[in-house]
Amino acid sequence: MTAYVLWTMIQSEVRLRTRRISSIVAILAVVAITWMMIADPISGSVLISVGDARVVYNSLCLALGSSLLANLFFGLGGFYLVRGRMNDDFRSGCGSVLATMPISNSVFLIGRWLGAVAYLCVLILALLATILVLHLLRGEGPIQLLVYLKTYVIVFFPSVIFACSMALFCEAFAPLSGKAGDVAYFFVWMLQSTVPIVIADHGSVTSWTPAMIFDFSGVATSNLGFLAMFHTSHFSIGISDFDKTLPPVVLEGEFWSTTVVLTRIAGGVIAALPVLLAIALFHRFSPDKIKLSVRRQSWSLIGFANRLLRPLTKLTRPLFALAASLPGFTGQVVAELALSLASSPIMSAGLIFAILAGCTVGSALLGGFVLIVVAFWGVQISDLSVRDYQSDTESMTAVVMGGASMRYWRQIVASCLLGLLLTAPVIVRWAGHDMLRAVSLVSGIFAIAATANLLGRMTRTSRTFIALFLFDLYLATQIKDVPFLDVVGANGVATISSVVMQSLFGLIVSVFAYGYTRWRAA
């Protein structure tokens, strides 16, 4: 009976999740990023290089490179893609029904967890299908499907387990059930992603070490495979330059040793431990435990911080008065801005801090400061476009002058204004000596705001945008010499071409979002 319940829950979870537009958006984003990283050797770059020689694009090379690159996104974005089911149950009233079901908490949560794992596996299989197409276009040698499947299972297993386990834990633990959990996981993932760096710093890259169990990304463990096959740990994965005068090398034979496979299995077991905490903390949709945390967010860490900072809402009163005195669209935008600041005192506190710090921080630190401020702003505006939907006020706000279409424009303009206010001191300082960098920051804010509004309206959740947004910021901190990844000018490598392209991207996205809003409101 338990097996039947679990199988039914897995099927239901996969069907519900795969039907969401967020699933399509996520897989398309992963495919686009992965394909861009798998460069055509004719261009002078290659997916994997060993020493200064390129690695032939056979099945093992493409499987290993694509899985290690995509694993970065699934380790981070997978968490946000599987989040939100508990809150959906509560809002829809299904929680009360589920609370009366004659199954234990452990069976219910394990079923949800297995369903989330199965859902991410479906997305990974979709990614694999596109990589097989790429193999037909750029590959060298026959497609070895078993090699692809084995490599994908070994690489993705711990990270997928960890993302789903942490998502379940945050859903079951009321203080982390909201945006606080989203932010907390990003820092946990960042901390976990430093494991390969720590192993390298301690000189353990040439032999197995117990710390590799916590290498969910697979970077450190894959190093053992390169060491055994080529007797060197000097390799690069991603967009790598190579020496065309050197003969290409071939990845072939058994890349994964028994020790590495057992290490990945042990890592998956460790990654599943948060499920046990979730079972112990699960609220079973009890009103006395989740009513306040969902409706008033009093148990939320961010809700607690907002209550402490509530006096700052007095600073928004002049904005409301100004909105009432301004006519038409301008007044609506100011009102939207005032509402965003009043409903989130953390944003008001962050605005004060960003303005003061932006005027005083050293010039050499402005790039890192901008990334922190933009990350804070992006997370705060991620739910602006879904705020009316989540509070069931869409129909009411749609009857305001201008309807749903005007609501879209005032929300995107308010999002941009918040970003510009937070980064205003940096924009002014950069404009004095590096105008291109300042323009890159402004255009980046516009492109990010447009993307947040589009994804929020299409997927009805803020987490799709958060996953892609935080992943993009992470790439910007790791790959500092690619202009198109320097969206907000933090690395100082943006070019006129990259600024024009991201401005054009933001314009296309905003127009498309406007058309989608008009179509949905019709």
Image (tube, rainbow, N blue to C red):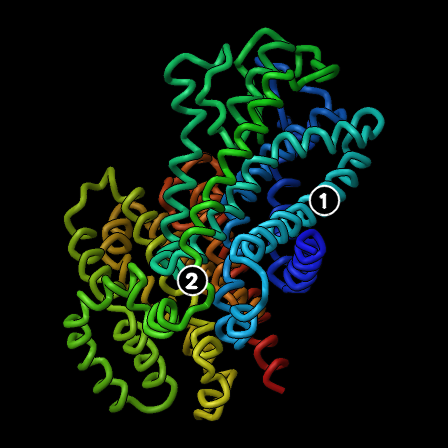
Which mark is first along the chain, 2 or 1?
1
The residue wearing badge 2 is 283
At 35% from the left edge and 71% from the top edge, which residue is drawn? 288
At 42% from the left edge and 75% from the top edge, which residue is drawn? 411
Q: Amino acid at mark 1?
A: Leu
- Work out which residue is located at the far right of the displayed protein and give it: 142
Q: Position of residue 155 (x, y in %)?
A: 61, 31
Q: Amino acid at mark 2?
A: His
Q: Is residue 114 above or below residue 45?
A: below
Cα separation between marks 1 and 2: 34 Å
Where on the picture, by quarter, is residue 211?
top left
Tell which of 97 and 410 is nearer to you: 97
Disc 1 crowd, CA 10 A, few/some/many (<14, 14-19, 20+): some
At 60% from the left edge and 39% from the top edge, which residue is drawn? 70
At 43% from the left edge and 79% from the top edge, which residue is drawn? 391
Q: Is residue 409 above or below residue 348?
A: below
Q: Callout 2: helix, strand or loop?
A: loop
**Can you say which quadrant of the picture contains the N terminus?**
bottom right
